[in-house]
Amino acid sequence: MKIHEYQGKAVLRQYAVPVPRGEVATTPQAARQVAQSLGGSRWVVKAQIHAGGRGKGGGIRIADSLHEVETLTSELLGHHLVTPQTGPQGQEVRRVLIEAGCTIDRELYCGLLVDRASGQPVLMLSPAGGMDIEEVAATTPENIFREYIDILIGLAPFQARRLALKLGFQQKEQQRDFVALVQQLYTAFCDKDCTLLEINPLIVTDRGKFLALDVKMQVDDNALFRHQEIADLRDTDEEDPLEVEASKYRLNYIKLSGNVGCIVNGAGLAMATLDLINQAGATAANFLDVSGAATAEMVENAFRILMADPEVKVVLINIFGGILRCDVFAEGLLKAVHTLQADLPIVVRMRGTNVEEGQRLLSDSGLNFLLANNLAEIKDKIVEALGVQV
Amino acid sequence: MSILVGEHTRLIVQGMGREGTFHAEQAMAYGTAYVGGIAPGRGGSETLGHPLFDTVAEAVEATAANTSVIFVPAPFAKDAVLEGIEAGLDLVICITDGVPVLDMLQVRKYMQGKHVKLIGPNCPGAISPGKAKVGIMPGHIHLAGRVGLISRSGTLTYEAVAQLTDRGIGQSTCVGIGGDPVGGLNFVNCLEMFENDPDTDAVVMIGEIGGTAEEDAAAYVKAHMSKPVIGFIAGQTAPPGRRMGHAGAIISGGQGTAASKMATMATCGITVVHSPAAIGDTVQQVLTARGQI
């Protein structure tokens, strides 16, 4: 789960990680008031959206007067910000973070994440702050310093000191500050079950102090059961409305751009089904996993989500049930189609017990079902169904 | 022989709720030696004609169990796995979905240097057709034979198995290693076991987007495998930055795409299947060309 920068900074404050003074605002007037109460003569106006690359998209602006804070805020609020990560349609800005400006001496990259290959958390530091870390990894990998962390021991101070030296912090006081900072970050990372905690840039001010200028915090969805305080930070405005709806039914749904809506049980099979649709020369409207143990009720809910997507022209249902009774499943499907008055072609592939009986129920229904016996036939039936549609 | 599970398996189930009890029954029906269940607070009683225990250590002591399968809810999965490891089991299979990744990091560290093998979490388990079934896969789609199968998926594994069985190609062992970013056995571990298994002639590996497990496997195949490996990667059309159902199935920072995995696998001598519909046919061609069917 992603949270906003301002929310991430509030979390870090609880761990005594130095972050700039600032507050969020939802109107230009409020932004001006925040700036006024912060004082000083320079402020930063930062659009709060989940997508990265905000700087490149013009979502991070410098204001040199209270008036400018107000105008920049009104330029951002209510407008769609397009960044390299939002897609061409952009993401609407609903709030901005106003922060006191600061003088930067050095910009570093600092990231904590789960290293899948070694099965350990890894702390990464780079003197190339403010840049895309993937780009640094690709072009100058020698500029990334890593410390793998023994999760049963924690981040040892000597590991942090080793990084401090590589970054060129020779002074004792600065080393001490750096060690304290990364240890606090690691504590927050573990306490909040983060999968990613990225400070980019982590700056050194003209007074030699560290400051987390930006924060990207992602929390493990699987751990939200023990973090109600993080779950409460969810901003559904940042998500596709159909995805929000699907999540209410605990369906794994991702909106895509095509016109073949699909319902599949199991994530791997669902991904493979998208590939199959693609190989049929079509594009899927969505990814939807109703979980390995699919029931007719889940399929009805899934069907409702698909029908709410105006792009969907054909529905594909691919269910591999081990102990699923296909006749029972077919009855449930017929009920759903009837309830939702769906009149578009539906390609059905199901495997389980009583397949023949299930297929007979569907073909005798008089509805627009195209039955496939295996994955290879799915491809043909999609082509056929799209042909019927045109 | 087969790998991981077989005639030697003495199975206990950790978490004898509705699901655990159902699958214990299914395992017995398949012929697996189920010897008892763990249900804290119900120790001393009996279910399915076998004893229940409060702790894994008691069960191991009383039944000489060597394998457990875990069905407890996600918040308790770490504890269940740790308990299984501590009791000295040879194999722990965690079916539970939704386990926090930091919990698994702790488990991984705790396991280091111990002889136990962990499969999962978020997996269907392992089956050696005709011998033992430890997991939630439907037993009847399998056929005893000489092809090994390793997969990060559940139903896609069943799909691949069914394609093999439909063509009369049997399986030695099918292992679902799970869809989480950090788990127990990986592709390389399983490939190594299949390479050393005299009853396996070829291996099918079904990967998906995210991480580098398939690339590591490809490097292993090139360096160490004499047996043919046939591979498929799910998620060839998955958008970057989105988790495709499995916690581990995500393309991040341009890394972990299906295209790059398939290219690496092909370079390393793995026969790469592009369509999920062609897994069975491809295995058949490979085995026919080698005179193994």
Image (tube, coloured by chain):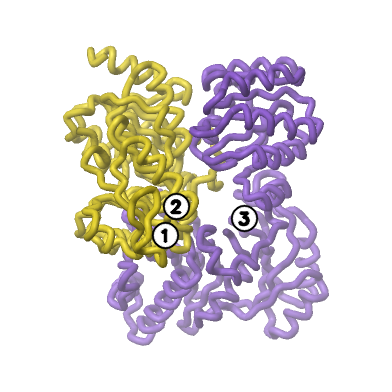
Q: How many other residues sit within 10 Å of disc 3, few (<14), some (14-19) or many (≥20)?
A: some
Q: How many other residues sit within 10 Å of disc 2, few (<14), some (14-19) or many (≥20)?
A: many
Tags 1 and 3 both on a single chain:
no
Q: Are marks 1 and 2 in contact (CB under 8 Å)?
A: yes
Task: Please tell me whether mark 1 or mark 3 is closer to you in this view.
Answer: 1
Q: Which mark is residue A62?
A: none
Q: According to the colouring, which chain is yellow?
A: B
Report the side of A96 relative to B235 (left or right): right
Q: Residue at x 25, y 61 (%)?
A: B87
Query: How many numbered circles does the render carry?
Result: 3
Amino acid identity at mark 2: Thr
Q: Earlier in the sequence, mark 1 or mark 2?
A: 1
Q: Which mark is residue B77?
A: 1
The quadrant of the image that shows the C terminus of chain A is: top right
Q: Give x and y (percent) for residue B134.
A: 35, 42
Q: Can see residue B106? A: no
Tags 1 and 2 both on a single chain:
yes
Q: CA distance from mark 1 to mark 3?
A: 33 Å
Above/below status of B74 relative to A87? below
Task: Please tell me whether mark 3 or mark 2 is closer to you in this view.
Answer: 2
Q: According to the colouring, which chain is purple?
A: A
Q: Which residue is mark 2?
A: B96
Disc 3: host chain? A
